[in-house]
Image (tube, rainbow, N blue to C red):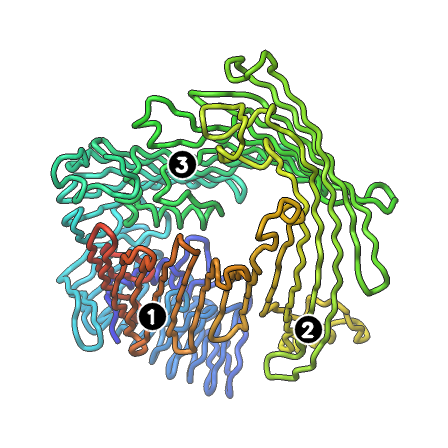
Amino acid sequence: MACLALILFILIVTSVYASAEGKSRLLEDDPKEPWHIIADEIHYDDNANKYIAKGNVTITKQDKNLSADYVRFDQKNMKAFADGHVIMTVGQDILTGSSMEMDLNAETGTIYNGTIFLQENHFYIKGDKLKKVGKDSYTADKASITTRNLKITIEGYGFVKHAALWAKKIPVLYTPFLFFPAKLKRQSGLLAPQFGYSDRKGMEYIQPFYWAINRSSDATFYLDYMAHRGEKLGLEYRYVLDERSKGTLMYDFLNDKKVDDGSPGSSERWGYEDDNFLRPNSNRYWFRMKQDQALPFGFSSRLDIDIVSDQDYLLEFKDGLTGFKQTNAYFLKNFGRDLDDNDDPVRTNSLNLNRIWPAYSLNAELLWYDNVISRRWEETDTTLQRLPFIEFDGSKQRIFSSFFYFDLESEYTYFYREDGARGHRMDAHPRFYLPYRYKNYFTVEPSIGVQETVWHLDKDEYSPSDKKRFNRQIYDTKLDLFSEIYQIFNVKGKSIEKIRHTIRPQIIWDYIPEKDQDRYPLFDDSDEIITQHQDEYSLFDGIDRIEKQNLVTYSITNTLTSRSKENREKKEEHILDKPNGHENHNPSNYVYNQFCRFKLEQSYDINKEKDDDPEPFSPIYAELELIPGRYFSIDADAEWSHYDNEFRSRNIELNLWDNRGDKLFVEYRYTTDSTESIYTDLLLKLSDRLSTYAEYERDIFNGQVIKYGLGFLYETQCWSLDIHLIKDESDYKYQLMINLFGIGNIGL
């Protein structure tokens, strides 16, 4: 099948002819490395200084391999001619032709009736004559069924006549001529545009412009034209200094033609009902940034910024090149950190400094929660900030050479709010352990923790007394009793050698004494700091108020772990390399897969029993993780109440797939008197190239359809076409995307 002739410039950037990093070139020779020739007959002409090889000729050099029926090699002038079933491979790329001429000094040559296979992009490119006419210039005659002539100059531009994109025997796109850049280095210029249509935006066209600033930084500018909303401008700046030091900054601005000011029809057309707040502003923006920086002495820092103009912005612009989904996926991939959900009006901003030692860790952070609704609509903002939050922890470790162990959790926080109480809090919570293992039967581990908390208030008006400093001590105890029983089964299957079944019963007793804490400060999201009835307030964390506890939790966990025997062959090969055949007993030579985990757990609250609570037992909690590795996986959990004789919650995720590429994902979530929803997406392979997919999400509890969509995907080795219809709660969207592999996307 013929591909769009434009993709021939991939020939340059994938190093079949040339590479910016100096990778292998088909027509380029390194004189320092020798050629090795094998053939049925080899003759050497002393006068002409030529090698002539006939019959099953094979010439090799490093990762290059040339085979033909006949080869003539002029060593003096560094010219070669190959004829008859010519096949040349460079790495995984393959070139074939009826004959080939090469001038290794001039780096020129011609391949007749040639075909090139590019492994990186899986392209087949054909031409009557593929010529290298200069150091960085190429021409191709009849390079595809729909291409008459093609000329390419490296670090210059390519020119192609009569280029077409074909699906089977049907032409999809055609252009009589086309100029395109053939750059090995990053080059400033226009990128592929995207376009689309939706009810809320109208016709949309996005044009990116790329700026190659220098070797370590670049930027992209976006012009997003929306017929109903106006022009949205975007900027994305990126830099990379090394693996641990990099950053990305993004900013968008829109002077929106539409507002949600409460006028008739404005909320239905341009607003969202979830937050019950209007959006009368037309100036809209979104600034986000993530940065990683390596510092001296093993320290590192992280910066996360997320500031948005209004509570509806990320709901409105969740798709597209600068939308929430694209941004969130980029940050997660490149920084390992994502953003708050797009429907969350409180955005997290932080500056973090951290250092990790073998047994300790330091984490210092400035945390600012930008409450968009409070900032815009309320006269007072009582959002509680942590400026700073410093945490120093120690992992569980032996105390000198004794039988005792300890770990440590400690923190310091300064709580700040623009309106309301402010103050300092310091907390230290060391825990001491004395584990004891009785043979191979069971392990018992008693421990005791001592927690010391100190508060200091900034303002007297938030304390019912003149006291500004408070101190609290409290202890807690824990007893952990567990055992582990296992059995190994010899399966002797095709892919599995053995399966280990492990049963782990466990009983944990947690005890915290009752302590009157009403006189201590309580930092929460209200504008008060001292409470007489703590149940009236939601706690900000679990430190200001520590509830009494007398809880026994018992559980049993079953795990199934397989050992793959396919790596046994690798181990045996490794043994052959050992001197005298000595075996390296390294368990990492095998592949272990925990493909099933099933846990049952319940708690008994002794305090509830003493207080005559009718339900001292918690619901029975169960969770299942099943990943056998082929065709399906299940992740489920549920809570069963024996008092109500019904489920209080049940959640399940199911994945099904087959070797053909069909996929089904189903997610169901249920909580009594609260939520019940289902989400599913399906992909069906109608043929090797044509697929259809669909998604559906429904709020069963409220009887509403949240989202549904249907699409078709056509894929070839060179390009793909994606047509998709999406209907969510507030908008219809029609998407069409053409992806030219190795070049870019056109569509939205």
Question: How much space separates mark 2 and mark 1, taking CA atoms?
Answer: 35 Å
Identify the residue at horizontal 75%, vertical 62% (top origin). Answer: 483
Residue 430 point in image, percent of width and height: 73, 37
Q: Is residue 49 visible?
A: no
Q: Quadrant of the C terminus?
A: bottom left
Residue 172 point in image, percent of width and height: 17, 68
**Height in image: 601 above or below 367?**
below
Kind of residue sitting beneath label 3 = Arg
Question: How much space separates mark 3 and mark 2, taking CA atoms?
Answer: 46 Å
**SS of the residue under disc 2:** strand
Q: Quadrant of the N terminus?
A: bottom left
Kind of residue sitting beneath label 2 = Arg
**Dot 2 crowding, Cα within 10 Å, few <14, some 14–19, many 20+:** some
- What residue is shown with label 2? 500
Image quadrant where residue 301 sits:
top right
Query: Mark 3 or 1, which is nearer the eye?
Result: 3
Identify the residue at horizontal 57%, vertical 60% (top origin). Answer: 620
- What residue is shown with label 1? 683
Q: Nearer the viewer, residue 50 or 567?
A: 567
Kind of residue sitting beneath label 1 = Leu
Q: How many marks can you see?
A: 3
Residue 295 point in image, percent of width and height: 58, 33
Q: Is residue 148 visible?
A: yes
Q: Nearer the viewer, residue 537 or 56?
A: 537
Dots 3, 1 in contact, CB < 8 A: no
Identify the residue at horizontal 67%, vertical 23% (top origin). Answer: 471
Question: How much space separates mark 3 and mark 1, taking CA atoms?
Answer: 34 Å
**SS of the residue under disc 3:** strand
Image quadrant where residue 619 sits:
bottom right
